Amino acid sequence: MVLSPKVYQFLVGVFASLGSVLFGYDLGVIAEVIACDTFKAFFHDPSPTRTGIVVSFFTGGAFCGAGLAGPIADKFGRRWTIVIGSIIYLLGGALQTGAQNLEYLWSGRWLAGVGVGFLVMIIPVYQSEIAHPSIRGKITALQQFMLGIGAFVAGWVSYGTYIGLNTTAQWRVPLGLQMVPAVGLGALIFLFPESPRWLLDHGYPEEGLKTLARLHANGDETDAWVRAEYDQIQESITFEHEHEAKSYIELFTSRSSFRRLLIACTLQASIQMTGVSAIQYYSVKIYGQIGISGSNALKYQAINNIIGLLGEACCVLFIDKLGRRRPLISGNLVNMVCFLIACVLVAEFPPGSTHNNSASWGFIIMTWLYNFSFSATCGPLSWIIPAEIFDTRTRSKGVSIATMTSFAFNTLIGQVTDIAMTNIGYKYYFLFIICNFTNALFFYLFLPETARLPLEEMNYLFTNAPWLVARYDKEAYRAHYAEDIERRALEIEQKGAAIGRHDEEAKTG
């Protein structure tokens, strides 16, 4: 059976997203690891600062990995970058699983973080470059969906080992299992196509055309739509080589490129300031704020992961219909309300001073509602938007810097949260209430709609659209590249038909 092109693109995107499973699994499993009694006993009851390093070294390594991945992806291609990230992650996973002291564990955490930095930076870039514009959001949203799959698996593995084991296997088994997806991803990625845009940008036109045909026409290189997209990409790349930013420095000096970089970096920073990392890394302690015990906290967090998956599935299904602006703005506002209610509950019903079950359940439901909102909107869009707004020459560089920004803020939250929860308790939530509101305001004012636009149209959009886009008609700053592809395809079909008629007439004449 021959798969339709869009189904094939989707399945390639699913496989590439195994790298996101690794990140999601770590986000979900580390809360259980640092909460285990056997972990605390084995490492001699580490202080909050040393425990924070276990968390933040991973994201610190990911910061470095994302930075290295940009130039490597440009030089060696998207698939080789995925292989390198998988190998580094495997080395880190092995060190964590066999750790004999905290320093040993820290080194494994840092290496695994470097590998994840490679993968979560390059995967949405790869997905966006192979996808048809009409389903690009759906395919790049798989990054967050598969991250949710990783968190879901981690949640239930964590719960099972937490209540079922009482040796160091309680935390070594969850850490060891993280290596399984990395083996499959690194070993099999070359069965799938390289990015056609990378091939065309690096002087491989025949391979680029063949890959476009494989992705969009079941290998038919004469397909009119394939030829039209090939011509449009070639023209766009030629223009980029002559006029657009080519280096990291030019990302900051080119007005159009800097505007895109600012939006991408602000978006990635804003995601961490929604409070999601604080909940993921320290779920046990945060649930403890309302008097919920460790094992029950892990159980509720595992249920929370299922709810997150439902939200991410909704995003995959509907994001190309709803666009980018409205879901991102509304998601931040819902997040703000959830944190506000959770903050009031903890302030009014402090743990130990009351046995108000309704307050406890109210807190749990708010964390669940928050997770659904985040997973359906902000989380997936933090990968979708940066991967689609840059041009071919700067995409890896721009997404690399944006991903570094994400991990820098992630590291900050991972290091600060435990200390903040210990010293100021629920007042720490004020930060996330304010930031979710300012996030929504920023994107309402400055983020243009990019849904369903070809990647080659982004230069025109960010060059011509006003910086304040809140009340402007988006049709006023569109170049209609999608319609241009259809027009080119029709012309190619008509030309082919005319040649066919001419040949037929020559034969009969």
Image (cartoon, rainbow, N blue to C red):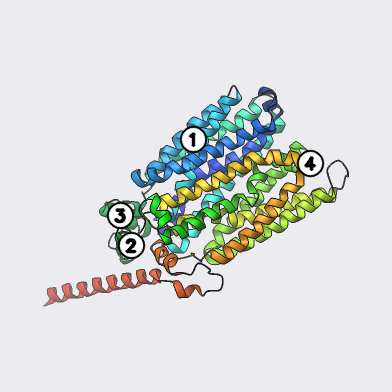
- Identity of the residue drawn at 49% across and 43% down: 19
Q: Nearer the viewer, mark 3 or mark 2?
A: 2
Q: Secondary structure at mark 3?
A: helix
For residue 299, the mark is none
Using residue 316 as the reference point, say whether residue 35 is left or right of it.
Answer: right
First along the sequence among labels 2 and 4: 2
Query: What number is the disc on residue 292?
Result: 4
Amino acid type at circle 1 is Tyr
Secondary structure of the residue carrying numbered label 1: helix
Crowding around mark 2 (Cα neighbors within 10 Å: few <14, some 14 to 19, many 20+) is some
Label 1 vs label 2, nearer the camera: 2
Mark 4 residue element: loop
Give the residue number, with chain letter if any, for mark 3.
200
First in residue order: circle 1 vs circle 2: 1
Q: Residues within 10 Å of mark 3 (few under 14, many from 20)?
A: some
User: Contact, CB < 8 Å: mark 2 with mark 4?
Assistant: no
User: In the rendering, at what x and y percent does residue 149 appear?
Assistant: 58, 46
> Viewed as shown, does residue 495 lie left or right of 282?
left
Q: Nearer the viewer, residue 343 or 247?
A: 247
Q: Residue at x 70, y 38 (%)?
A: 419
**Residue matched to label 1:** 89
Q: Which mark is residue 236?
A: 2
